[in-house]
Image (cartoon, rainbow, N blue to C red):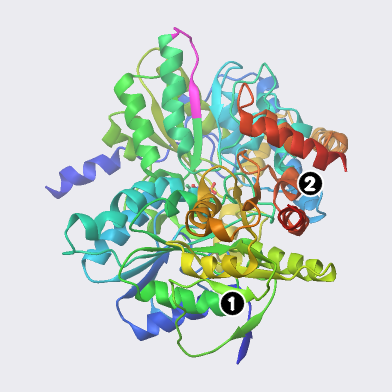
Amino acid sequence: MKHVLESVESQFEMFQVLNENGEIVNKDDMPDLSDEELKELMRRMVYTRILDQRSIALNRQGRLGFYAPTAGQEASQLGSQFALEQDDFLLPGYRDVPQLIWQGLPLYQAFLFSKGHFHGNQMPENVQALSPQIIIGAQYVQTAGVALGMKLRGKKNVAVAYTGDGGTSQGDFYEGINFAGAYGAPAIFFVQNNYFAISVPVEKQSAVKTLAQKSVAAGIEGIQVDGMDVLAVYAVTKHAREHAINGDGPMLIETLTYRYGPHTMSGDDPTRYRTDELNDEWEKRDPIVRFRKFLEEKGIWSEEEENKVVEDAKEDIKKAIKEADNYPKQKVTDLIGNMYEELPVNLQEQMEEYKEKESK
Amino acid sequence: MAQMTMIKAITNAMQTELKNDENVLVFGEDVGQNGGVFRATEGLQDEFGEERVFDTPLAESGIGGLSIGLGLQGYRPVMEIQFFGFVFEAMDSINGQMARMRYRTGGAHNAPITIRAPFGGGVHTPELHADSLEGLIAQQPGMKVVIPSTPYDAKGLLISAIRDNDPVLFLEHMKLYRSFRGEVPEEAYTVDLTKADVKREGKDVSIIAYGAMVHSALKAADELEKNDIDAEVIDLRTVSPIDIETIIESVKKTNHAIVVQEAQRQAGVAANVVAEIQERAIMHLEAPVLRVTAPDTVYAFSEAEEIWLPNEKDIIEKVNTVIDY
Ligand SMILES: Cc1ncc(C[n+]2csc(CCOP(=O)(O)OP(=O)(O)O)c2C)c(N)n1
């Protein structure tokens, strides 16, 4: 019987296109991307790494609020986002701000989100997304709903949820993948397995060998991907998207990745639960270094080009943080006005009260 | 006696009870090696081992259900909800299940569970981290809801909660964790879960508060004294069930009362206190009992939270209104 039980796990071997040395190890699945597109992927990863570094610095200076570092996860975040279309609907977690930015959320709004201003949650008209979810797993059940809605409306789009490894322990995770599976809804459930849910390593999170195999219980497709390999992540997401749109149901994607920084900038100390050796091991798999090698080998990337991206990013960030700083402060009366479509009596009264308080 | 912050007093209470009773188990997200995101369980896993102090998978509903099950096996679970805003996932376990265990089994089973959670605002957390949801659980018969305002009370009340054979929600205001120190005995002691505390005696007005608002009320009382208004400040400590006797005794003396809560105005603990006062002591009142609360919106986004939260100025204003009525 043992071999029967083991057979499920054997179906979930990690998928890779580009190895740690930037060599193609899986020609058959090399995505069909032009040189320009390949360079764009690199540009986005480098830009996002700089954005992460600057955001951490701005947070330390007190110019940003809540911030969850992203360095290390660029391939997972941006490889998947690059495979999406503009009208696909994103339901991200608190760490998934880069996907929103590349989907079209202006940087200054991302900063306002960090500062705890609701304008940071108001997506531009061309961006189909909710702002980052704080409640772990809530986006999974909601994604099933968005995807079912798309199916009922006959849209050719997908709904995409992002969580981490810890998120797969929540009941909402199972309910979301199960509902989407039962309805054959066009959803992509994206688990960025960065090995730690704050301090808890994935082996303590669950006895499961891969998170991808949780798809089996919902009867949907699942795959584990090298999350430091931007080409693999892109290829798998592209496949999942087509699969979903063709009516073949949702897919669960697990990417193996790592966050280099602390969990968030609000007091987490990763030295309490991670070793330098583990950090070094993962930095050797860095998605940017690996992809740079690949592009340089192909002769389509140079140091100058990369420096230009770095300078552009810094310039954009400087402008955006100024814009965020100068954006009108939100008032309690704004919040009162947003509670209902029409103000009920209790809030009418309180509106007057707080108008007076704010005018002082 | 040692000087401790509230968070140290809380750690100390758990340590005391882990030592005192081998049935006490402490668990939740990140409470083990990491010592909790606020460090409330710091050092406990090292001292008591992974069987007694442990990390759970990331699932509040699971944590709640696990507590009920362990309780049925004779353990005394002390479960942590990392931030109280995440309690919704565990609401069935709390309000739907543990609160009615004794009731539905005719006393054959109980749920000797303590739920600890940081709550309250003013520390610029992201959305859903700072809500004051005590009213939701206070409305559930079968639950006790305890909110300490000092390090001394925190230790004594938490030990009482852990020893209590019924489920107790123990809410720790984030702003009070490290904002000041107080005297806390090293040894085990309990503080009665059924008694409010008269923090300051006065004859002109009763200010009834709990949690961080007790400190705002005390500051307001100092200010009011400069204008010859002598305020009595009552710390409820347990918001469900409420020690109504202490309150009525005070109102009979002062003939004026206001109730202060950080939570939104609609429903909630303050509304209940006002109702109790008017039912039992209306003939002793010289003015309506007024409330100081946050407005009826969802907890404010970080940038607006300072104005949104009630403060000592609001308290002074309301006191003046009832005194001048
Ligand atoms: C319902 C809920 N419970 C707990 C938390 C607190 N919390 C925030 S992030 C986190 C760990 C999440 O880990 P994982 O899902 O692996 O994502 P990662 O942060 O690693 O990207 C926890 C416990 C929360 N935000 N929501």
Residue under the point 66% across and 41% down: A288
**Residue B223 sits above or below residue A136 on the image:** below
Q: Chain of mark 2?
A: A
Residue B45, image quadrant: bottom left
Q: Nearer the viewer, residue B108 or A27?
A: B108
Crowding at label 2, few (<14), some or many (≥20) Cα neighbours within 10 Å? some
Give the percent coordinates (x, y) of residue B15. Answer: 45, 81
Q: Which residue is mark 2?
A: A54
Q: Is residue A155 magenta?
A: yes
- The kind of secondary structure element at disc 1 is helix
* Marker disc for residue B151: 1
- CB of residue at label 1: within 8 Å of ligand 1? no
Q: Nearer the viewer, mark 2 or mark 1?
A: 1
Given residues A346 and B49, the one toward you in this image is A346
| Viewport quadrant of the N terminus of chain B | bottom right
Q: Residue furthest front?
A: B283
Q: Which residues are magenta?
A: A153-160
User: Hey, what amino acid is under mark 2?
Assistant: Arg
* Chain label for disc 1: B
Instruction: Give amino acid for label 1.
Output: Pro
Magenta span dominant secondary structure: loop
State the SS at label 2: helix
Tell me the residue at 39%/45% (across/down).
A170
